[in-house]
Amino acid sequence: MEKTVKIGFLGCGNVGGGVWRLLSGFSREIAHRTGLRFDVRRVLVRSLDKHRDLPAGVLTTRVEDVIDDPEISIVLEFLGGEEPAHQYITAALERGKTVVTANKVAFALHWHELQKAAKASGAGLYYEAAVCGAIPIIHTLEESLQANRIHYIYGIVNGTTNYILTRMSKEGAEYADVLKDAQRLGLAEPDPSSDVEGLDAAYKLSILASLAFHGRVPFENVYVEGITQVQAEDIRCGQELGYTLKLLAIAKRDGLKVETRVHPTFIKNDHPLANISGAFNAVFLNGHACGDMMFMGRGAGDLPTASAIVSDLVRAASAQKHLYPTFENELNPTVALQNNTDWRCAFYSRMLAQDRPGVLSRIAQTFADHGVSIAAMQQKGARAGGHVTLVFITHEASEQAMQQAILEITPDVATVESLLRVED
């Protein structure tokens, strides 16, 4: 026997339109597989004048028509951004309506508030689509890997930056040129700052790390560095040494110490993430029981994200009882994970050095004074003005030690042109 569930939309942009197309065009298959049919009663939009492929009778500009409708049991949020999405989601949850969202910003910043409101009213809160689009990584961490202690996560979780770095790597193109192409093709926003500065990936990492490590990892604890300063020359030098550059979201746990960071990262060419190209996303993780695992797919776009939304919608409508993460999801939990800002990794550095005897030994000694040892070094051809390009890969060292060593290399020895981190 089929069950009809009445739902409402908050917003109806690309993703909302994708969900509408899935629910209308794929409804027979969904009903056959799940026994559920979904009736979209109201859709909140900014203007009634814009043409949409939806029945005019469901459109409204009043949020109250969605969250106060007693027949609507599940609300799907597509507004994006922190506000008014946070306010509207909270209001829907307080009224006992289950919410399905793809909003990583409002969710990462206000998760503790939203979960509290959901538990108080008995409503569900589902957010698979907030991270990596169609890839079911949230469900995997929440349910499939419960018998695992997750040691680390490496993620390519932003398609725009992965597209840019892929083009730079394959073509030797400069960042600014590829960004313009990405904007022209619709792969980058007119204002791409959230993507290219790493913020989008940081919101997602906050969510992933909290689930993986069973403790609150606030967005504020994520170190963020984007790709705007990446130079084609560094990508070429890394390739010569056997490395590929990716914007990685990295989370590692050691006891109660957790490091979370987003930054351009060199990984070896044979690493599974090195071949994730274009706008694809991937998450590589390690658990004590499952070992290494990788998940790859489309992390954005109307239909891939809609696929995750509808999956959550079916899960929410089928649930006898809504489940919530079991860790203490509070602003200031009793037992808090400790933020480790002095992580250890290897480093890549490119310097423009004075071409005279003793310069290399002075650089090596400065590194050694701070406990940094050199694993590989290349010297490029001489440049005008009596300079040569030196490229270093270090052994694993502490972040603070490496930063201090770089500060102590003075211009009369070398200028540090770039510093990037390296992961195994």
Image (cartoon, helix red, strand yellow):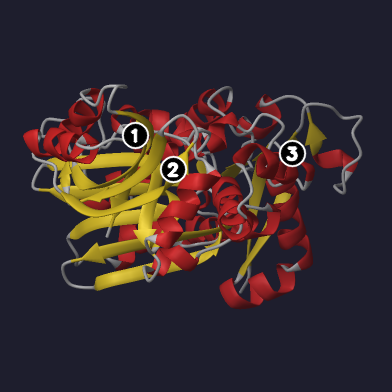
Neighbor class of circle 2 (other Cα within 10 Å; few <14, some 14-19, many 20+) is some
Which residue is at 79% across, 43% downward? 184
Q: Secondary structure at mark 2?
A: strand
Give the mark, 3 or 2, whose residue is nearer the N terminus.
3
In the displayed structure, 168 sits above or below 30; it is above
In depth, the one of 221 and 324 nearer the eye is 221
Q: Amino acid at mark 1?
A: Ala
Mark 1 or 3: the one toward you: 1
Q: Position of residue 1 (x, y in %)?
A: 61, 74
What quarter of the picture does the C terminus occupy? bottom left
Q: Which mark is residue 382?
A: 2
Q: Is residue 27 visible?
A: yes
Q: Secondary structure at mark 1?
A: strand
Which residue is at 55% across, 50% downward? 165
Which residue is at 24% across, 23% downward? 407
Q: Amino acid at mark 2?
A: Ala
Which residue is at 28% across, 44% downward? 210
Residue 417 appears in which quarter of the rendering? top left
Residue identifier under label 1: 353
Q: Position of residue 241 (x, y in %)?
A: 37, 60
Q: Secondary structure at mark 3?
A: strand
Neighbor class of circle 3 (other Cα within 10 Å; few <14, some 14-19, many 20+) is many
User: Relative to 40, is 132 on the left or the right?
Assistant: left
Q: CA distance from mark 3 to mark 2?
A: 64 Å
Q: CA distance from mark 1 to mark 3?
A: 62 Å
In depth, the one of 226 and 170 nearer the eye is 170
Q: Position of residue 137 (x, y in %)?
A: 41, 60
Residue identifier under label 3: 43
Give the mark, 2 or 1, whose residue is nearer the N terminus.
1
